[in-house]
Image: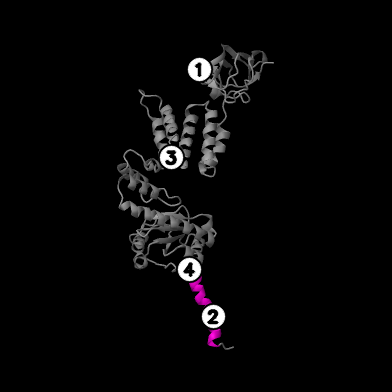
Amino acid sequence: MTYSFPTLMKNVILPGLIALVVGAPELTAAPQIAETYEAAQAILQDDGYILFAYAEDWDTYSKEVCDVLMASPVVQQAAGNAVFMRVPIPDELTEERKKADAVRYGKLRVPDANNYPALLMLTKSGRHYATITGPYMMKADPEKVAAEISKALQSMRNQEELLTKAQSANGIEKAKLLGEAALIPGINPPDAPRKLIQQINKLDPRGETGYARKLVPPFDLSMEIFAIESQKDTSKPHGWETALKTAEKYLKDTVYTNEQRQALYAISIGILRRHVPTSAARIRKLARQMQKLDPDSDLGKSAGTVIREWGTGLTLAEGWTPGIIAEKKPVEVDDIPPFTKPGTYTFTLVRDRGNHNCNVAAISLYDGKKLIAEDRHEGFVGPNKSENTEYKLEVSTVPSSPHLFIQFNQKGSANNSWGHISLSSPQ
């Protein structure tokens, strides 16, 4: 079949020209592969490096995954102009291998990954800003891996732009730019948190931007509170009490991130668990708040277990346990009974099991901080039904904020007792 030039112009050339004018797909240069640091330097551009790290010899599948992804057009397009490099990870790093790797990778510091295969993303200067690993990599899913690369790469570009602006800024403005760059989600901060905090503190000595506090790693924040808990200075209040108050103060500061706040809730729960056996209600409250911040995080997921395992204390339904009656101060009942009308409320304590009796000194009812009813007498709860003990509270005004306390009076270490409490309301 032959075409005249006008027909060819109409059917082939014109559509091609129109496509170029009105929006043909944007063509991007495919990333180039370099086998050594020296070779990478000759072709390196603004998007830096993507290192395809895989297990050498001891897991051939991870190499296959990296080969598939390196050859994938969708992965290549997502990678911008980054240079691709293969990074085989040996089972044993011998001295000979160290020397060979030093020649191969030059000034590049190859970061470790939790598992392989992994994509290690580095800036043009060699700074490690992101790692992609996990299910998407294991399945060699080009679409999803490409999406992760694209997100991380764009975040890095935004971060580098902020860092460039920070170079010509001073004072508070520079502190803000550094803080914003460090807190871009999904990638690593541009430097170690402690160095960034020191730098920002110098630029913002009064902490007006709040970035120095935001940058404290959650683990470090927990360790700060734990150090206060562990202090042994007898001239000061108990360390754990000061630690709890410090954590509460930090939690009121809206600067802290959700991740930091979850860590503060977690360390507070631990302190209560270690020092206050009857803090079940407080533990439940803190665990729910921790969960609400981010239900899908590790700490958010652990909240349910915390509530189930540690959120049980002195209740009317479940009664008392050896740890509870060992307390030397009034113990608050977690499930506040309904004080709906004035009259006499009768509490009956019944021992269920254990080798020891349960001795009670008083039951007290407060409305907020005001004592409104109390029955104070020595009670003896033994193994027989006749040794059940009753306490009566004469309530003249219905409390708006009821708090019920029981004062146990155990002798020495005789705490091996379990029991329950029943309530009779006014007729």
Q: Which of marks 4 and 1 is nearer the N terminus?
A: 4
- Distance between the alpha carbons at the discs numbered 4 and 1: 82 Å
- Distance between the alpha carbons at the discs numbered 2 and 4: 20 Å
Where in the figure is residue 218, as x and y percent of width and height? 43, 41
Report the disc number at residue 26.
Answer: 4
User: Which residues, given as a range, are shown in magenta?
Assistant: 4-23
Disc 2 target residue? 12
Q: What residue type is disc 4 on?
A: Glu
Q: Nearer the viewer, residue 303 or 155?
A: 155
Q: Where 227 sits versus 398, above or below?
A: below
Quarter of the rendering containing residue 105: bottom left
Q: Nearer the viewer, residue 353 or 346?
A: 346
Report if the CB atoms under discs 2 and 4 are less than 8 Å apart.
Answer: no
Instruction: Give the mark toward the camera: 2 or 4.
Output: 2
Where in the figure is residue 33, as x and y percent of width and height? 42, 67
- Main SS type for the magenta part? helix
Report the disc number at residue 412.
Answer: 1
Q: Where 393 sits versus 200, above or below?
A: above
Say few, some or many: other residues with alpha carbon within 10 Å of mark 1 (under 14 / 14 to 19 / 20 or more): few
Report the disc number at residue 256.
Answer: 3
Q: Earlier in the sequence, mark 4 or mark 3?
A: 4
Quarter of the rendering containing residue 41: bottom left
